[in-house]
């Protein structure tokens, strides 16, 4: 039996993990969310959500943004359309 999650359920799950990843260092991660933030809290996380070609709801997390010192650069950024997992483009 196939089980389809609602977009709300999928989005809530993704939304809960984004702040946790953004506030944590990511330089020692071994997954697709590895980045250069060696302190945590100095990079942005994001992604996109929508429908697959098959019509299923989905969330595609983005590759984390680069470490940014807000006192020097003003703000950190992320490119939502750059998938953390390239197979999800």
Image: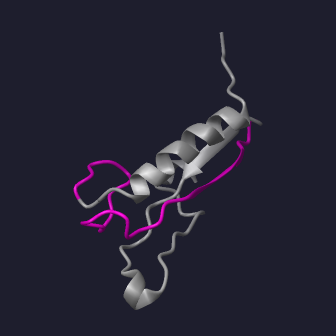
Residue depicted at x 42% and y 50%: 20
Q: Nearer the viewer, residue 76 or 78?
A: 76
In percent of width and height, residue 70 lies at 42, 82
In percent of width and height, residue 86 lies at 48, 54
Residue depicted at x 63% and y 36%: 10
- Note whether residue 51 is visible: yes
The relative height of residue 27 versus residue 32 in the rendered view (above or below) is below
Q: Residue furthest front?
A: 71
The relative height of residue 86 versus residue 65 in the rendered view (above or below) is above
Residue depicted at x 60% and y 63%: 81
Q: The magenta stretch spans which residues?
A: 28-54
Residue depicted at x 54% and y 63%: 82
Residue 47 covered by magenta stretch: yes
Left or right of 18, for residue 56? right
- Note whether residue 85 is visible: no
In percent of width and height, residue 49 lies at 67, 49
**In which image quadrant can residue 73 be found?**
bottom left
Quadrant location, the N terminus: top right
The relative height of residue 47 versus residue 31 in the rendered view (above or below) is below
Q: Nearer the viewer, residue 13 or 88?
A: 13
Left or right of 83, for residue 5? right
Q: Main secondary structure of the magenta part?
A: loop
**In which image quadrant can residue 58 be found?**
top right
Quadrant location, the C terminus: bottom right
**In which image quadrant can residue 36 be found?**
bottom left
In percent of width and height, residue 34 lies at 32, 57
Residue 36 covered by magenta stretch: yes
């Amino acid at each position: 039996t196939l089980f389809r999650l609602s977009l709300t359920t999928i989005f809530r799950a993704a939304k809960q993990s984004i702040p946790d990843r953004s506030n944590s260092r990511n330089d020692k991660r071994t997954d697709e969310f590895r980045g250069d933030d060696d302190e945590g809290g100095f990079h942005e996380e994001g992604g996109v959500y929508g429908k697959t070609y098959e019509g299923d709801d989905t969330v595609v997390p983005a590759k984390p943004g680069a470490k940014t010192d807000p006192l020097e650069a003003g703000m950190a950024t992320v490119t939502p359309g750059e998938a953390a997992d390239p197979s999800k483009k």
